Amino acid sequence: MANASVSMVKVTDVYESLQECLKLSEGLAGLNTNDRILIKPNIVSWDFDLPFPPYGVVTTSVVLNALVRILAEHGFRNLTIGEGALPGLSPDGDAVYEALGYKKLQERYGVKLVDFNQEEFVAIDYGDGFKLDIAKQALEADKIINVPVLKTHNQARVSLGIKNLKGCLNKKSKQYCHGVGDEELSRTFPRIIDKLPVALTIIDGLYTLEKGPGPTGKAFRKDLLIASRDPFACDLVGAAILGYPAKDVAHLINYAKSHGRSLELADYEVKGESVADHQEYVTYDWEWSEKDTGPAGFEKRGITGLAIRKYDSSLCTGCSVQYNPMLILLSSAFKGQPFPNIEVVSGKQQLAAKDFDNTVLFGKCACHLNKNNPNIKKAIPIWGCPPVLGKFVEVLAKEKINCDYNEYVRFRHYLFSRYKESEGFNLADWSVK
Ligand code: SF4
């Protein structure tokens, strides 16, 4: 529904604050009690092997629990929670749903739990040659309640409701969304919503995240809930809270153009808390060296002989998740001596440059794209879609570049432990009492 108001509430008690938020936005007005309702959280990834801080990364279970309880109290009985996390990199949905406490929602309210990756996808033609495979369960729902996280995204700047729907796609279509040119990320994923019955968006802002969307970014406690029946308006307000006017966010610009929507915050009604009172800039991207030779931190450490080209939007989430570990591994191989004149390229459009003795091709796409690149003296292909870290260590070891996987393990422990002393950070927010 276009031009419905957006509500924003400061969270005190999650259940009561969500009730207030839904009341202000008339969030349940478009739903019928006999509707098949699909609730779509954001569980972009999860990990049982190494510590995984979910703050600002994954929708909190306390918000989901409050939502299900409110819906049940209003007589809604046909509820499903569905998500399609990164296949191949995340454990199966059932185990994750158990860890997040969703099984209790199943027992208490009869909520069905669906891992899209285990179910059927349907090829949907958007016209003009644009096609996506969307989860059948999402297409067949009468209404979708979208529950993203209030977080930044190092490629899309903000990752809110419209972006969260990418989790309804199969692996192939997720990858397709990270194309080049007319198929560039900011043009593709905003179209997903056009075929889905999204009736309500609730942005979970208990925590927020800089340099998202994964746990390598840093989280902050925010205690906000933002809701609207208008998905675009909800994202526009969410973006404003993170410090990004819609006119600075390519996918919001593209969506606004194709749907005739205003990019001006002043054109939307916001009820409850004021945007100005909670607006705070949250960094979305990693600092890179001016010469595009690697993260700023590498330069500060005096790492030379290595040029890691900055990832672009054609690097899909699978490779993005492995990208930061790849940096940690390369950093662990630095023992004070220059690297042997190596360039690292990734994604679907980075072509290796001249003047390097070795070229690491990170991922299947970079391998294919640079197959006949005459600039390459010696290729070090890291096949995989996405590449596996163990393989990366193994291949580089053959080139006498010795990465220490334990350094990455230590890094993961550090990521998790840095919230231990932080006030307001509570892992119980990802459980159902
Ligand atoms: S290799 Fe990486 S960038 Fe290419 S399709 Fe696979 S995950 Fe995406």
Image: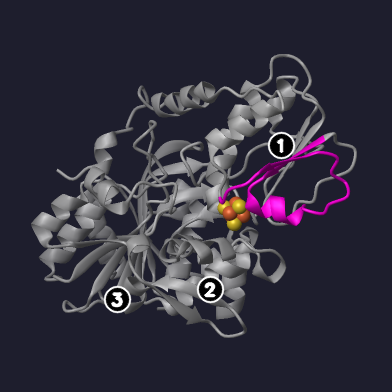
Q: How many marks do you count on the picture?
A: 3
Q: Which residue in the structure is indicated by mark 2?
A: 191
At horizontal 47% and vertical 48% (from top left) the residue drawn is 151
On whether residue 359 falls in the magenta region, the answer is yes
**Number of residues whose C-alpha sits closer than 10 Å to that of mark 3, classed few (under 14), some (14–19) or many (20 or more):** some
Query: Magenta span covers which residues?
Result: 358-385
Which residue position holds label 1?
288
Q: Whole-percent x and y of residue 75?
A: 11, 71
Does any portion of residue 54 appear in the rendered image?
yes
Residue 247, percent from left and from top: 63, 62
Q: In 3D space, how far apart are the residues under numbered discs 2 and 3 (Cα atoms)?
A: 18 Å
Is the CB atom of the residue marked by disc 1 within 8 angstroms of ligand 1's nearest atom? no
Q: Residue at x 53, y 82 (%)?
A: 126
From the viewer's perspective, tell me whether residue 13 is left or right of residue 160: left
Residue 16 visible in the displayed image: no
Q: Quadrant of ligand 1?
A: bottom right
Local secondary structure at mark 3: loop
